[in-house]
Image (cartoon, rainbow, N blue to C red):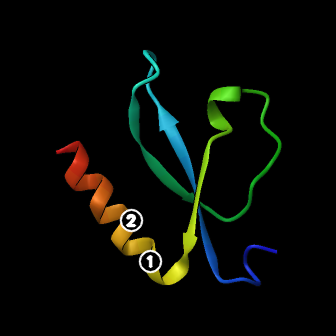
Amino acid sequence: MLRAQNYAIFRVRYGPKEELIGIERIDEIGIQDNLAMSDYLLCPKEEAARVLLALEKANA
């Protein structure tokens, strides 16, 4: 459904102290046993590069 709407899917990644360490682009949302792997960010595909760049700047 998200692909049909032309959305990019990212998984939010956290470190051992629950700090944000980044996001990774994924193709689909699967079933996770680990709740720490269950946060997602969705955006229109044409905005995906801008989202990644903004996150890199925020983490710099």
Q: Which percent across, then down, holds residue 34?
A: 71, 26
Q: As drawn, is 60 to the left or to the right of 29?
A: left
Q: Quadrant of residue 2?
A: bottom right
Using a 10 Å C-alpha cutoff, classify the residue at mark 2 as few (fewer than 14 neighbours), some (14 to 19) or many (20 or more).
Answer: some
Q: As drawn, is 12 to the left or to the right of 31?
A: left
Q: Quadrant of residue 56?
A: bottom left
Q: Which percent across, then down, holds residue 55?
A: 32, 54
Picture residue at 38% right of the left edge, 36% below the top: 21
Picture residue at 53% right of the left edge, 44% below the top: 12
Picture residue at 43% right of the left edge, 25% below the top: 15
Q: As drawn, is 4 to the left or to the right of 17?
A: right
Q: Quadrant of residue 17?
A: top left
Q: Give the Cα distance between marks 1 and 2.
A: 6 Å
Q: Which percent across, then down, holds residue 23?
A: 46, 49
Which residue in the rendered view is the most extreme toward the top?
17
Picture residue at 70% right of the left edge, 27% below the top: 35
Are the residues tagged 1 and 2 within 8 Å (C-beta)?
A: yes
Which three-letter amino acid code belongs to the residue tagged 2? Val
Instruction: Reply above or below: 48 against 6.
Output: above
Instruction: Reply above or below: 8 against 4.
Output: above
Number of numbered labels in the structure image: 2
Give the residue at mark 2.
51
Q: Secondary structure at mark 1?
A: helix
Give the residue at mark 1.
47
